[in-house]
Image (spheres, rainbow, N blue to C red):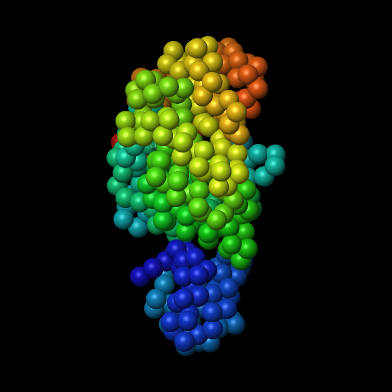
């Protein structure tokens, strides 16, 4: 049986048409589940009893199970248990402009990046769209507030779960769904080139972030196994196509790893690579984990790196460090749990 939160408005309309009902019923259901946040289909007072019984036979309306929450002033971290006993996590960040949530797209990740906690635990399965939608609904329920921004940067490679992730975006963007503006949604990928190309035809104005983390293939090969399949040049070519079609500025994420990718030469090389491209670079102080050999770059290195990029007239920011004291880096909470 499908979970109701898995359906796009088009899929729900099709369901009603197939059952000889008017398609506007789809919008009605959306208003109940996303507007009024009902917990049982019986609460839909504007639908006939018979139709409610039919819907109850066809769909579940269950939420996920939160098994652990770590709370801090600026960030909450949630560990969820799914129906099959697997675990995922979401991170809520409290900004002055609103609340943003970082959601997971898979249970584990197959990309195996050397610095990443999620990559240490192999992919068990893709998340269904409803399991992504419900991460948002559950957290909104917990804080009793609306979330304004969504980043798909938790556990998993979203472009390895393309269909469910794009359906998820359609659901949360819909005005009668969660109505989260497309410009407030960001997908981050390690560089799955065919999917970047496919994404350039996705008709929603969402933001794309690329986890680059190195200015050349030699360093990137060492950090990210996916670079063996798709080289930096392949990614840049795909991004040129993406940019031509969407005209949207691209974000490059760059984790600062002590002694590995944080030298002045690296900064210069990065600028040569990205110069003239409509993009900005997000420098991410590495969140150190217990199991990894990597260290966070020292602050003066990060600032020096930042200055060089700035002087080259490439847009750059340093990411604020959220919740490094409550294991908020990608995959850390789940990884602790799986080790218990
Ligand atoms: N798989 C996708 C999205 C999830 S990872 C991707 O790789 O883009 C989201 C971001 O968190 C990536 O840029 C990833 O490199 C980064 N990341 C992973 N582990 C981290 C850590 N310990 N500290 C800081 N950033 C980390
Ligand atoms: Fe997967 Fe992203 Fe972690 Fe790499 S950084 S292992 S792609 S979650």
| In this view, 119 is above or below 127 | above
Rendered location of residue 339, percent (x, y): 30, 36
Is residue 332 something that shows in the picture? no
Front residue of 227 and 246: 246
Is residue 221 something that shows in the picture? yes
| In this view, 152 is above or below 252 | below
Horizontal side of residue 339 vs 237, given as left or right: left
Horizontal side of residue 108 vs 196, given as left or right: left
Quadrant that contains the C terminus: top left
Front residue of 141 and 150: 150
As drawn, which residue projects farthest toward the right? 96
Q: How many marks?
A: 0
Rendered location of residue 36, percent (x, y): 61, 68
| In this view, 255 is above or below 128 | above
Horizontal side of residue 112 vs 210, given as left or right: left
Q: Residue at x 62, y 59 (%)?
A: 179
Front residue of 291 and 285: 285
Q: Residue at x 47, y 55 (%)?
A: 166
Q: Residue at x 50, y 27 (%)?
A: 254
């Amino acid at each position: 049986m499908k979970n109701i939160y898995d359906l796009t408005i088009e899929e729900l309309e099709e369901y009603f048409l197939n059952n000889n009902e008017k398609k506007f019923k789809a919008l009605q259901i959306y208003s109940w589940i996303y507007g009024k946040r009902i917990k049982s289909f019986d609460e839909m007072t504007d639908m006939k009893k018979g139709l409610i019984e039919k819907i109850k036979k066809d769909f579940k309306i269950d939420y996920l199970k939160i098994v652990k929450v770590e709370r801090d002033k600026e960030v909450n971290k949630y560990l969820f248990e799914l129906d099959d006993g697997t675990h995922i996590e979401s991170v809520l960040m409290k900004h002055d402009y609103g609340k943003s949530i970082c959601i997971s797209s898979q249970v584990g990740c197959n990309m195996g990046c050397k610095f990443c906690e999620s990559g240490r635990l192999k992919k068990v399965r893709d998340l269904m769209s409803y399991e992504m939608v419900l991460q948002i609904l559950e957290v909104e329920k917990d804080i009793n507030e609306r979330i304004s921004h969504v980043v798909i940067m938790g556990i998993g490679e979203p472009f390895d779960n393309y269909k469910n992730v794009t359906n998820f975006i359609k659901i949360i963007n819909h005005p009668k769904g969660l109505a989260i503006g497309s410009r407030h949604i960001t997908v981050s990928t390690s560089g799955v080139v065919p999917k970047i190309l496919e994404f350039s035809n996705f008709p929603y104005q969402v933001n794309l972030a690329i986890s680059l983390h190195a200015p050349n293939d030699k360093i990137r090969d060492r950090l990210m196994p996916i670079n063996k399949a798709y080289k930096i040049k392949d990614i840049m070519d795909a991004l040129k196509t993406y940019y031509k079609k969407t005209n949207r500025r691209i974000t490059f994420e760059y984790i600062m790893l002590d002694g590995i990718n944080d030298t002045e030469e690296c900064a210069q090389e990065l600028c040569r690579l990205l110069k003239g491209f409509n993009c900005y670079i997000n420098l991410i102080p590495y969140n150190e984990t217990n199991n990894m050999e990597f260290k966070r770059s020292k602050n003066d290195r990060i600032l020096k790196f930042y200055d060089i990029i700035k002087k080259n007239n490439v847009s750059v920011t340093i990411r604020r460090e959220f919740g490094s004291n409550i294991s908020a880096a990608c995959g850390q909470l789940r990884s602790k749990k799986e080790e218990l």
